[in-house]
Image (spheres, rainbow, N blue to C red):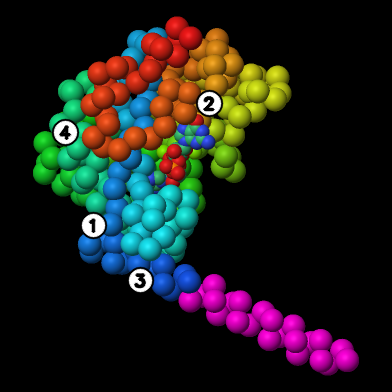
Amino acid sequence: RAKHEGKATYHFFEPALDEAARRRRQMELDLRAAIKDGGFTLNFQPLYNLAERRLTGFEALIRWNHPVRGRINPAEFIPLAEETGLIIPIGEWVMREACRLASKWPSDVTVAVNVSAKQFAAGGIASTVMSALSSSGLPAHRLELEITESIFIADVETTLTTLHSLRNIGVRIALDDFGTGYSSLSYLRSFPFDKVKIDRSFIEDLGTSTSGHAMIRAITMLAEALGMETLAEGVEDVAQFEVLEREGCQNIQGYLFSRPVEADAVFGLLREGAGYQRQLAG
Ligand code: C2E
Ligand code: MG
Ligand code: MG
Ligand code: MG
């Protein structure tokens, strides 16, 4: 009887593993095809400065238009792209396309591009950035790179050298998803980031706990002391917005003002201020 169950279990799991591996392999092949055939697009989500009451820039967010499965969000394919090394060509495309599109925007509007730690570790990021800037004509100061603390998992010395060479090109550097990593504070000390993007999880907490306020206050005070700007991610309601403004957070991003939009819709958002005035009035 026991023997029979054991055997049944074996047969039950084995095909499931095969199936997962097969799906993964298929997805890798599909990713390769998408790189070759232009299967990706960029969406853009506005970033607002509270003091200036103005839309200052957009974050570029990749979308995959899968021939069978339809639109796939980055959380579903970026990890596989990182494991397979495909993040390098994908990241190069994102950089080039974001700069190309942003070069058509008004000259006071910036673009933020997410850079994976794998791109960082691979070494070519500075030349990718320079080439994207020169082929698009976008001035370096209008490009902001968003990196996460995971870049510091690699050799810190090399990481800092790369950060400084990017800084020398003249691009801005933001620390994304701040507060989710292991020892965020020490990373803040190791490099003068231009901006700290406070992770959405802290903004979510604002509705449910008062300690959330204290976290936001502590992060904004620390960033200010270090000469870094702050931005709160994932602002979804007016209550969160009011706390952030009161606690001195300088910039915000979130569904309250706008979801990510297609590239063509950027101009409409720029014209109307992306509902920012509307929201503040309401
Ligand atoms: P991220 O860089 O932290 O980007 C912000 C994410 O939060 C985006 O998800 C955005 O759509 C979402 N978001 C913005 N406001 C709100 C809000 O009010 N509520 C909620 N619930 N979500 C909000 P998205 O576009 O799915 O991207 C997820 C992550 O995928 C990004 O997180 C980033 O880490 C990565 N990613 C996106 N595009 C790229 C890319 O071009 N290259 C690389 N390497 N990673 C990318
Ligand atoms: Mg980001
Ligand atoms: Mg983020
Ligand atoms: Mg985030």
**How crowded is the residue under tag 1: few (<14 C-alpha within 10 Å), some, or many (20+)?**
few
Q: If you read the primary sequence from the N terminus, does the residue marked by circle 3 or circle 4 appear first? A: 3
Mark 1 to mark 4 CA distance (whole Å): 20 Å
Secondary element at image label 1: loop
Pinpoint residue 77: horizontal percent, then vertical percent.
43, 57
Residue labelled 1 has its Cβ within 8 Å of some atom of ligand 1: no
Amino acid type, mark 3: Leu
Q: Which residue is found at the position 20% from the left and 37% from the top?
A: 101
Disc sitting over residue 28 in the figure: none
Q: If the image is split into quadrants, where does the N terminus sit?
A: bottom right
Q: Residue furthest right?
A: 1
Give the label, 4 or 2, closer to the camera: 2
In the image, residue 202 above or below residue 77 = above
Q: Which residue is found at the position 59% from the left and 34% from the top?
A: 201
Residue named by callout 3 = 29
Residue named by callout 4 = 103
* One can see residue 156 in this view: no
Pinpoint residue 186: horizontal percent, then vertical percent.
54, 36
Mark 3 to mark 1 CA distance (whole Å): 14 Å
Amino acid type, mark 2: Glu
Residue named by callout 2 = 236
Q: Is residue 260 magenta?
A: no
Over which residues does the magenta segment extend? 1-22
Residue named by callout 1 = 38
Q: If you read the primary sequence from the N terminus, does the residue marked by circle 1 or circle 4 appear first? A: 1
Q: In this rendered view, identify the residue nearer to me: 77 or 215.
A: 77
Task: Report the magenta stretch's main SS.
Answer: helix
Amino acid type, mark 4: Ser
In the image, residue 62 above or below residue 196 = below
